[in-house]
Structures are given as structure tokens and as C-alpha cells.
Image (tube, grey):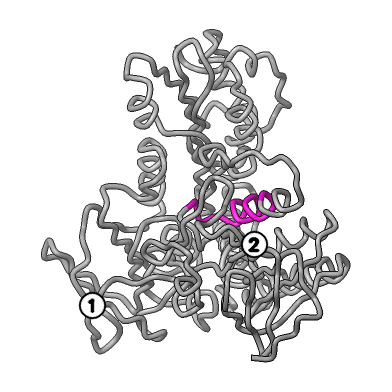
Amino acid sequence: MANDASTVFDVVILGGGSGGYAAALRAAQLGLQVALIEKGKLGGTCLHNGCIPTKALLHAGEVADQTRESAGFGVKATFEGIDIQGVHAYKDGVIAGLYKGLQGLVASRKITYVSGEGRLSSPTTVDVNGERYTGRHILLATGSVPKSLPGLAIDGDRVISSDHALTLDRVPQSVIVLGGGVIGVEFASVWKSFGAEVTIIEALPHLAPLEDENSSKLLERAFRKRGIKFELGARFAGVEYTATGVRASLENGKQVEAELMLVAVGRGPVSAGLGYEEAGVATDRGYVLVDEYMQTNVPTISAVGDLVPTLQLAHVGFAEGILVAERLAGLKVVPIDYDGVPRVTYCNPEVASVGITEAKAKELYGADKVVVAKFNLAGNGKSKILKTAGEVKLVQVKDGAVVGVHMVGERMGEQVGEAQLIYNWEALPNEVAQLIHAHPTQSEALGEAHLALAGKPLHNHD
């Protein structure tokens, strides 16, 4: 390798996704000299293969559903079908605009951007394109890729990953979605809106299994109403090709046939063959292990984002990257409370939450110390106008703060900002109940739920 020792960066960042570029931007803002290395496109999974494109598809699906249902609002419209190339043009246009803006940001901060596949060559160096980049500190942010199950080959044709699904050149007539987590239910929602028949296979007892059980049940009820089928508590046994597509077999003996199968069983870290273990970095099942300050066991190396075993969310990557940048700049930093991170699943209806579930609260504080309040969106004027169903559920420690907010319904992701403040500022129900929410808005539902917890329900049934 050519050893270019002319420049020693304050931090060399391997990976330009959410965690990596956030760290680069903040570090440069704080006066550090930064090198950012990315083998693909700046922005990583979130911008190009995850958050942004999937939400664009979901919005296109929402427009399709609204067109079909327009008569219910007194609007005459005819739904003629999905122009999938037009959908992709819309999606790609959104990505292109954000990508251009991000490139401009990185350039404006005078960050040394290196396009190429990097490899950690020592605790202070990364090799890429025949050059060696030396840093006083190294940040690993190489992200994740779609996972599969043992023995299940993703061929990109009939058995596909989320990457393939984002560029599929047609709307399939029928789809099996293997996995009922965030990725699975979002694609199930898209394809149903586009007109496909969808069946979800989930090994655990509920869809969105990491959410509060009440939220999962509300989502399942809504999916049934939409005609999305699902097999819960059903372990996948295998898949075979048929004349027209695929046939999935379950351990309970059931079989499901469809045109194609999406494997949505999660994402795994990108760490193999990148020199991490050779440099002495501790890993577990491919994940890089870090402390609460994102520091690895090697003093000069930190890691963030999907590469570490924390929540696989872009905004978590942002926060972790910023934390590392500020720590390296000598600022006082506070570890991330991952329970306080807002979580949104953008299917129809949306599932949004912050804090802990009712089950977790009972485990931590005891069942007799946990108080729950619910507000049905049927009592919320704006939700009635939107014709959405769902609920806001609060979990409170008796005579104490609200420790969990769980919401299901159209546009609930837009309410999670206030919910985040309630949890993270350890608000008491009567404090939130004093706040005046604009009418008619869906945010009133959050206010009404707190009124109920404070013992003075307005539109709630006692």
C-alpha cells in the first residue's frame, strides 16, 4: 500500500451512511479534520435503499388508496392502476434531490471525501484505492445488509430482499412476505395498496412484535380489514419454485403460494473481511461491540449505526455519530437513552411509539405500580375527518411519569415528536393535561389520553 503520511486526520470515518456522515458533518463543524470513506453512495442505506425510498413507495400507495376511496369524501375520481415506472421516477427524484443536497453539505464543510472500498489496516489507518488514510481516531460505520435464514437463498428473481423490492419493475399479483417486523409490514402495506394479494408469515405471535402488544393487535385488525393475510406463530420451513412462482411451507404443515417471496427477516452488520478482528476490535455475531459512548475495546476506534447492536434506525445512527464527534472534540456528552428514541412503522395505519411497553413497565415496576390509559381515535375530530381508526395508549408509573406512549393510526408518526418530549422530560399526566392542543388536530388525541390519566377525561368514555 502507498503510505501517504502527509496528512493525519483527526478522524477517519469508514462508511458514509447515516451514522458516518452525521459524525463527519458534526466533527467538521467542531473544527476537526475529517476523512469520510464510502464505497457506494453518500447517504447509505437510509437514503438509497431504506427509509427514503420505502416511504416514497408508501406515499404512492396512500395516493392510490385515496383515489379508490375518493367517493367516500364526495370526490369523483377513477383509479386506473399503478404506473410502476412513474412511481420509481417519483421515488428516484426524491432521492436525487436529497443526495445532491447531502453532497453539497459534505463539500461545504471541507470534509475529505473518498469514494472506494476501505479496509481497516491498523487501529489508526484505513486503506482504500491503494492509499492509506491515517487518523488519530477511526470511526467504523459500515452499516448493514438484508439478512436471510439458513439455507434460504435470495435469488433476486422469485425470492427477493428489500433491495430488490425497491426496484421491482412490476406490481406482483401476489406476494409472500417472510417476516412481520417493520420492513415486512411496510412492504406488505405498499403492495396491498398497489393491488397485490399479500400474505405475511411471522414466527412470533404478533405483527410488529417489538411494539406494545396492544399496538400489534390494532395493526392486525387494520390489516385484516384491508385484506392483508398473515400467519402468526408460524415458523418457515422452506420454499420451492412452482410453474408460476413460489410455494412456502410452514412447520405447522400449511403452504402458501404466490408470484414471489420477500425475505424481510431483518438486517445484519457489514463487518466481515474489513480488518476489524485483525485490528483487535471485539465483535459478536458480526456486530462491533461498544460501550455507552460508542467506544470499542480499542481506544482509537469507535463504531456507530447498524454495525453496532443498538436500534437499527437512521436517527439513532445520526445521534450516535454526533455523540462520537462531540466526544472526540472534547465536549461533554450524554449516553443515548434508547428507550427515549421515537420509533415509527410507516405502514397503513402507522405505528408510532416512544418509551417502554406495558409488559416491560410491569416487569420493571410491578403490575400494581403501572397505570394505563387509552384514547380511541373515534373520538378525535381530525381522525374522523381522515376516516382513520386507531388508538393512543399511555403507560404511567403510578403517581409518576409517563414511561410509554404507543399510537396506531394514520399520520401517528407525526405525533411522536410531542410523545418524545413527554417521555424524555419525564412529564407527569397533569402537566401534559394543562397544555392546550389545537382543535381539530390529531395531536388532541395525545392530550385527551393525558386528560384521562390526570383524572379529568373530556371526550373519553369513563
Tell me where the magenta segment starts and ends, as one range: 310-323
Say which residue label 1 marks. 239
Front residue (pair 8, 181): 8
| Magenta segment includes 316 | yes
Q: Position of residue 296 (x, y in %)?
A: 52, 57
Task: Examine the image and state in which quarter residue 11 appears.
Answer: bottom right
The residue lying toward the viewer, choosing from 196 and 24, is 24
Identify the element where label 1 is drawn: strand
List the residue tagged with mark 2: 18
- Is residue 216 depicted above or below 145 in this figure? above
The furthest residue to the left: 253
**Residue displayed at 38% across by 15% down:** 369
CB of mark 1 within 8 Å of CB of mark 2? no
In the rendering, at what x and y percent does residue 104 appear? 84, 70
Q: Is residue 401 above or below residue 146?
A: above
From the image, which quarter does the C terminus lie in?
A: top left
